[in-house]
Image (tube, grey):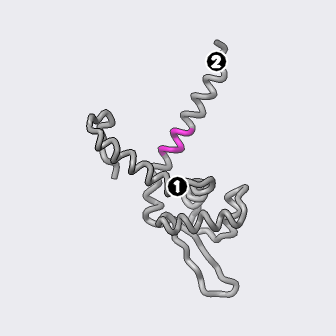
Amino acid sequence: MAIERDWRCDDPKQQLIWAAATRDALQVLEGKWKIVIICQLFGAKGPLRFSELEKRVEGVNQKMLIQQLKELEKDGIVTRTVFPQVPPRVEYALSEMGIALGPSMAELIDWAFMRRDARAAVSQDPA
């Protein structure tokens, strides 16, 4: 669904539209753990139980994980399925909207590696 854009567009209104869209997207993904949670759900071979997510997201406490998952669910990125059994079983998975983040996440990861490599090259430059 990539749309070709002329980033050198002279239309200030169009630039504001793109900036607002980017701001809206980043507001959904902001938070220390949301990107990590999304990456773990992408890497899973199916839905993950809360305890599995908690193990995979190193350093997050239970309260923060619950909060971040609730926000991701509210924003339509994650689905939460509760199974009526004792003890209750809850599973989390990416929604269609979450899965649609895949190409953007891949580009973001590529950019992060490119940035890391560029910074490493600068720090090794003897000049």
Q: State the separation of the CA atoms marked 1 and 2.
A: 35 Å
Q: Nearer the viewer, mark 1 or mark 2?
A: 1
Count the marks. 2
Q: Is residue 93 left or right of residue 15?
A: right
Residue 46 rendering spot, x and y as whole percentages: 56, 67
Q: Is residue 4 left or right of residue 105?
A: left
Query: With respect to residue 26, does 78 lie above or below?
Result: below
Span colored in magenta: 107-112
Instruction: Give the amino acid type for the residue marked by disc 1 in the picture.
Output: Leu
Q: Is residue 109 in the magenta section? A: yes
- Image check: 15 left or right of 90? left
Q: Which residue is mark 1?
A: 29
In the image, which disc is placed on residue 15?
Answer: none
x, y percentage for residue 55? 71, 62
Helix, strand or loop for disc 2: loop
Q: Are marks 1 and 2 in contact (CB under 8 Å)?
A: no
- The structure residue drawn at horizontal position 60% and vertical position 34%, both measured from the top left corner, is 116
Badge 2 crowding class, 10 Å Cα cut-off, few under 14, some 14 to 19, many 20 or more, is few
Amino acid type at image mark 2: Asp
Residue at left offset 52%, top offset 70%: 79
**Residue 10, quarter of picture:** top left
Quarter of image, res 64: bottom right
Q: Main secondary structure of the magenta part?
A: helix
Find residue 125 and name its label. Answer: 2
Give the structural element (helix, strand or loop) at label 1.
helix
Which tag, 1 or 2, sits closer to the chain's start?
1
Measured as percent of width and height from the top left, residue 61 is found at: 72, 62
Image quadrant occupied by the C terminus: top right
Residue 70 % position (x, y):
57, 68
